Amino acid sequence: MPSSVVATAIAVPEPYATDLRDARYRFGDRAALVTPTHVTLLGPTDVDAATRAAYERHLERVAAGHEPFDVQLRGTATFRPVSPVVFVALAKGISDCEQLATAVRSGPVRREHDFPYHPHVTVAQEVDGDALDRAFAELAGYQARFHVDRFTLYERIGEVWSPHRDYPLGDGGGLAEVTGG
């Protein structure tokens, strides 16, 4: 069966998405050009067509079973020296993201993870140490608050991650197809 690469994440809303994407690009991380600003729930995973259909049904149930919540982003942190990543940290919404990620990962799509789940917004990855240091320092005072009322299934088309479908949390009024990308 044909396969696709999907990921499930919480999209960071505007204007924060553009602010953080532009910062990520400024630090030399070219993934900023092809990756929407997000908090990962399930990272890139190969799925065949039958599994994907089951996964999408699973995501409907997960979304219906979780209520909307608030996220606060505050300051920077890093996974160094284990992994060369600088990120904006969650100060609020951590346990909500953890519960949502656990539920998303409990369905028909599973993959091995190198590290325990830690919700965050990446702002520099696969760049040199100076760029990581700059990202860490420049965004140390960053703050944003937003309401999470959905998560998104993304599909990689070529090298670009495009939103495929939004899944409203709780009684969000049904699924919303996403067009464009």
Image (spheres, rainbow, N blue to C red):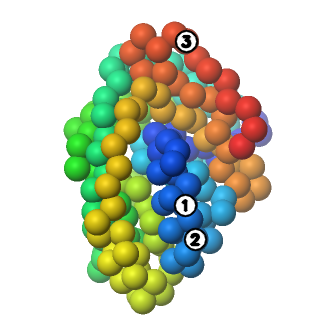
Q: CA distance from mark 1 to mark 3?
A: 29 Å
Q: Quadrant of residue 64?
A: top left
Does residue 173 lie above or below 72 as drawn? Answer: above
Determine whether label 2 and label 1 are within 8 Å by CB.
yes
Decide if residue 42 is in sight here.
no
* Residue at 65% across, 50% down: 161
**Percent x, y for residue 25?**
58, 71
What residue sits right under mark 2 in the picture? 25
2 vs 3, front mark: 2
What residue sits right under mark 1 in the picture? 21
* Residue at 28% across, 66% down: 141
Between disc 1 and disc 3, whose residue precedes?
A: 1
**Percent x, y for residue 96?**
27, 34
Decide if residue 19 is in sight here.
yes
What residue sits right under mark 3 in the picture? 174
Q: Residues within 10 Å of mark 3 (few under 14, many from 20)?
A: some
Q: CA distance from mark 2 to mark 3?
A: 35 Å
- Secondary element type, mark 3: loop
Q: Amino acid at mark 3?
A: Gly
Q: Is residue 51 left or right of residue 27?
A: right
* The N terminus sits in image quarter: top right
**Percent x, y for residue 30?**
62, 71
